[in-house]
Image (cartoon, helix red, strand yellow):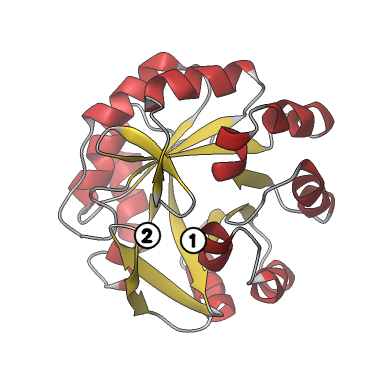
Amino acid sequence: MFPEFEVVPAVDMQDGQVVQLVGGERGTEKTYGDPVEAAQRWVEAGAETLHLVDLDGAFEGERANADAIDAIHEAVDVETQLGGGIRTAADATDLLSRGLDRVILGTAAVENPDIVAAISEEYPGTVMVSLDAKDGEVVVSGWTEGTGLDPAEAAARYEELGAGAILFTDVDVEGQLEGVRTEPVRRIVEAVDIPVVASGGVATIEDIQALKDAGAAAVVVGSALYEGRFTLAEAQRAVDEA
């Protein structure tokens, strides 16, 4: 998993369309068309991994974009990781048995930490625990509910339970194209030995480099790529040459 630093395009889906939300708030979305076309475009641009999110699933607790996700799997041949609406070990293992490379668990992992161990025992290294933070606190249910959990402390706990990676999303800067904050990422990197994937706020290639310097193993990029701030090839080349 992420043997070298990787820039990973996001394909966030809502109502069957690719969207990007600002600050995780429903109603702020900007739409970018068909998910399969987006996935194919990123793969053609050089993506080795796709970050898929069922936003309806994240908010409603039940996967709603399964058809689009299945179609993406049919259309591309790269690693895929999926989050949003995966609430049970059975859901996760079904997806993994059908060829998904990683499942991303947020709300489910917070509400039932043992789910991480259960899935990891059957499919080692495939669970990416999503720790989304707002005001320094882990939030769940589509970023709408606080938990009181410190992200770094939570990351260490999930590593002990068998998580293969941590996805850290800085909700306070998510989708705003105003830059990243590296200190929260650095804290989590220092707390665990498994890969930490950063997400939220990337506006420039310099932001990606800053997250790499903070110790992230990969960075998920959404709005900046869809808005043409830079190309995927430009971003990957810049961090590879740095």
Q: Mark 2 sits on what residue? A: 233
Residue in the image at 74% along x and 29% along y: 120
Residue in the image at 19% along x and 46% along y: 206
Q: Quadrant of residue 10?
A: bottom left
Q: Quadrant of the C terminus?
A: top left
Q: Position of residue 210 (x, y in %)?
A: 22, 37
Question: Is 50 placed above or below 208 here?
Answer: below
Q: Position of residue 4 (x, y in %)?
A: 48, 35
| Three-letter code for the amino acid on which mark 2 is drawn | Ala
Tell me: 79 left or right of 169: right
For label 1, the SS is loop
Whether residue 1 is visible, yes or no, is no
Of residue 242 and residue 212, the one placed in the foreground of this image is 212
Question: Is 190 placed above or below 145 here?
Answer: above
Whether residue 77 is visible, yes or no, is yes
Q: Position of residue 144 (x, y in %)?
A: 39, 52
For label 2, the SS is helix
| Three-letter code for the amino acid on which mark 1 is drawn | Gly
The circle on residue 224 is: none
Q: Quadrant of the N terminus?
A: top right
- Residue extending furthest toward the left: 178
Query: Mark 2, residues whose alpha carbon is within 10 Å: few (<14), some, or many (≥20)?
Result: few
Q: Are marks 1 and 2 in contact (CB under 8 Å)?
A: yes
For the residues labelled 1 and 2, the Cα–Cα distance comes to 7 Å
Question: Is 242 placed above or below 9 here?
Answer: above
Q: Position of residue 180 (x, y in %)?
A: 21, 44
Tell me: 61 left or right of 94: left
- Total numbered labels: 2
Tell me: 179 left or right of 61: left
Q: Mark 1 sits on what residue? A: 46
Residue in the image at 70% along x and 27% along y: 114
